[in-house]
Amino acid sequence: MFEDNERKMQGILNKCSDLQKIGFETEIFDLRKYFGKSEDLYSDIKDYKAFYALGGNTFVLRTAMKLSGFDEYLKKISTLPDYLYSGFSAGICVLAKDLHGIDFVDDPHKDPYNYGEIIWDGVGLIDYMPVPHFDTPSHPESYLMYDVVSYLKENNLPYITMKDGDVITVKIDTKVKRV
């Protein structure tokens, strides 16, 4: 379904290894297995207290979250004190209310699931667009992030730029804390 699947899986395994090194137990959940089966997803993840979503195409991830019901699950648990959601690149961008602007980097027409429509609404847990890889010359998409920022500025949309390695922590219903 995805090009270069072996490289992608190796990247996932490397991220799992990194998380294990700092004390997390990891399990890989492929949201595609849960398309149209949100109750099965909820049943399988109900005992997990932390989630880490990798990068990739923001629109593909957003569609997978919608089709599996993971987006609604995140909304449901977002104000509970003992849950953690962490994301990298697209994994954090999907949390915004609106995905306009990120299409300068990620193709919104990429539709590996044949969903048939572009989802422009993000999950909506944060009211700004995180702009990852900004001013990070080592990242191949860094130069495109300037276009994202220009669009967001021109349209008076809130955003926060992030260089690779930056972390933003948010407790839902409280202010953003940048670390």
Image (tube, rainbow, N blue to C red):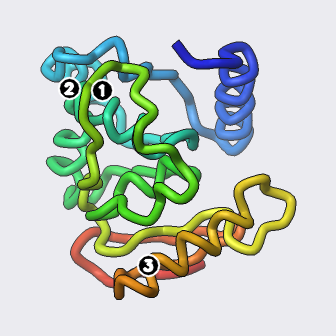
Q: Using a 10 Å C-alpha cutoff, classify the residue at mark 2 as few (fewer than 14 neighbours), some (14 to 19) or many (20 or more).
A: some
Three-letter code, disc 2? Tyr
Residue at image coords 21%, 56%: 80
- Image quadrant containing the C terminus: bottom right
Q: Secondary structure at mark 3?
A: helix
Residue at image coords 20%, 60%: 79
Relative to residue 108, is residue 138 drawn left or right? Answer: right
Relative to residue 17, is residue 153 drawn left or right? Answer: left
Q: Where residue 134 is drawn, which disc sits there? A: none
Three-letter code, disc 1? Ile
User: In whole angstroms, how far apart are the C-alphas of marks 3 and 1?
Assistant: 35 Å
Residue denoted by label 2? 42
User: In whole angstroms, how far apart are the C-alphas of marks 3 and 2?
Assistant: 35 Å
Q: Of circles 3 and 2, which is in front?
A: 3
Q: Where residue 152 is drawn, which disc sits there? A: 3
Expressed as whole percent of the image width and height from the top left, the position of residue 103 reads 47, 55
Residue at image coords 35%, 87%: 156
Expressed as whole percent of the image width and height from the top left, the position of residue 134 reads 68, 71
Extreme-right residue of the structure: 138
Expressed as whole percent of the image width and height from the top left, the position of residue 147 reads 59, 71
Q: Earlier in the sequence, mark 3 or mark 1?
A: 1
Expressed as whole percent of the image width and height from the top left, the position of residue 121 reads 24, 54
Q: Where residue 45 is drawn, which disc sits there? A: 1
Q: Earlier in the sequence, mark 3 or mark 2?
A: 2
